[in-house]
Image (cartoon, rainbow, N blue to C red):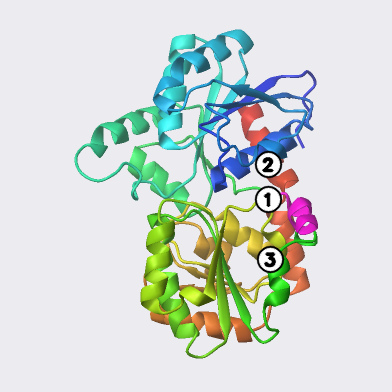
Amino acid sequence: MVNINTKQRLALFLPSLVGGGAERVFVTLANEFAKRNIVVDLIICTDADADYLHEVSSDVNIHIIGVHRMLFATGGLVRYLRKFRPRWLLTAMSHTNVIAKFALLLSRTSTHHVIRQTLSPGIMQFGRGSNSWPLRDLVSMTYRNASAVVSISNEMTPMIRDYYGVSDNVYCILNPVDVGGVVDKSFKPSFKVLASFKSEVKIIVAMGRLCEQKDYPTLLKAFSLVREKLEAKLVIFGEGPDRESLLKYAMECGVDEHIWLPGFCVNPFPFIRQADVFVLSSLFEGLPNSLIQAQLLGVRCVSTRCPTGPSEVLEGGRLGALVEVGDFQDMAEQIINTIKGPCISSGQLDSLREKYSVQNIATQYMDLLESL
C-alpha cells in the first residue's frame, strides 16, 4: 500500500450522482480514498436527482458547480482548479473528460488528468452519423494528452489503444465494490413483496438503466419462453426512458402480469441475494457492476457475451452462463439450466470478493497516481 507522507488533494469530477454504475464507482472510490490521508473532493455539476448523495462519506468534500449541462461546467471547474490546485483530477464519461481537459488548459495548473473509460470504445458512444466524428477526434486528443487512461477490463485495454490512438499510458484497473457494504445491505429487512411470492416461483432479477443499451426486449422474450417451462417472476431494478415501451412490449410477450419494474432502488441487494438467477442482457458494457455485485452475493448468473466485461467477470463461462447478444432462445435455455445448476463455491466467492474489494482497487489507483 502506498504511504503518502503529506496530505495531497485528489478531485473526482462527473456530471451528477444520479443512479448509475459510473456514479456508484466514483462514490465508492471517493469514500475509500478519504481514508488514506489525502484530501478528496467530489465535484458534480448538479445535485438534482442525486441518488447516491447520501452514500458519500462526511470525509469527502462535495463541490456543486450549479449547472444542469456539462457544456456549461467549464467555468466552474476552472475556478475550482485555480483555487484548490489538486494534484490529481479523475474523470469518467467522454463529454466530462473533454470538458475537464479544456478546464485544465484554461486553469494553467499542473494537475494530473486521469481518465477512466467506462464503456466499450466506439459502441454507441458518440451517437449515429457523421456528427459523431468531431467528438471522437476531441476525445482521442484528450486521451492522448492525459496523464493516464484507466481501462476497467482487460478486454477493453487494446480497444482503447486502437480506437483512440493511445499508446503507452493505458492501465487496467477493475471496478471496485464495497463488498462488506453490499453483503451487509443484502441482509437488511426489505421488500415485503417477496413474502407474497409462492415458494415454487423462481425469481429472475436484472438491474440497470431502462434504456437501449441494456436490451431488455431480448430479456422479456427469453422470459416468455422460460414461463413456458417454469413458474417465474422477472424483476428489473432501474429507471430510464424506455419504461413505457418495455411495459407495452411485456404485454405483447404475454408476461406483463409476471414482471415488476420497481424503479431505482437504493438497496436492491436483499432481493438480489434471494434471486434464483441474475441476468444481464446488454448490447455493450464496460465492466458491469450489477453482474459483479450479484456474483459477489453468490447468485447464479447469465449474461450476454457483449463487449466488454461479462466474459471476463464470468471467466469465459466458468462462473456463469454466456450467450450471444440478442439470442433470446439460448438466453431462455441458459436461464433454466442455471436455475437448476450449482452456485459458485465458497472458495471461489472469497477469491472474487478479494479481487473486487474497494481496498484492493483503491490501492492500485493510488499506486498509479503516485507514479505520475
Residue 329 counted in the magenta span: no
| Range shown magenta | 177-185
Nearest the viewer among 116 and 228 is 228
Q: Element under label 3?
A: helix
**Residue 247 point in image, percent of width and height:** 43, 65
* Amino acid type shown at disc 2: Thr
Of marks 1 and 3, which one's residue comes earlier in the chain? 1
Q: In which quarter of the image is the N terminus?
A: top right
* Amino acid type shown at disc 1: Val
Residue 183 counted in the magenta span: yes
Q: Which residue lies furthest to the left in this view?
A: 130
Mark 1 and mark 3: Cα distance apart in space: 18 Å
Nearest the viewer among 6 and 120 is 120
Q: Element under label 1?
A: loop
Instruction: Find disc 3 in the rendering and name its residue.
Output: 271
Residue at (64, 77) in percent of width and height: 276
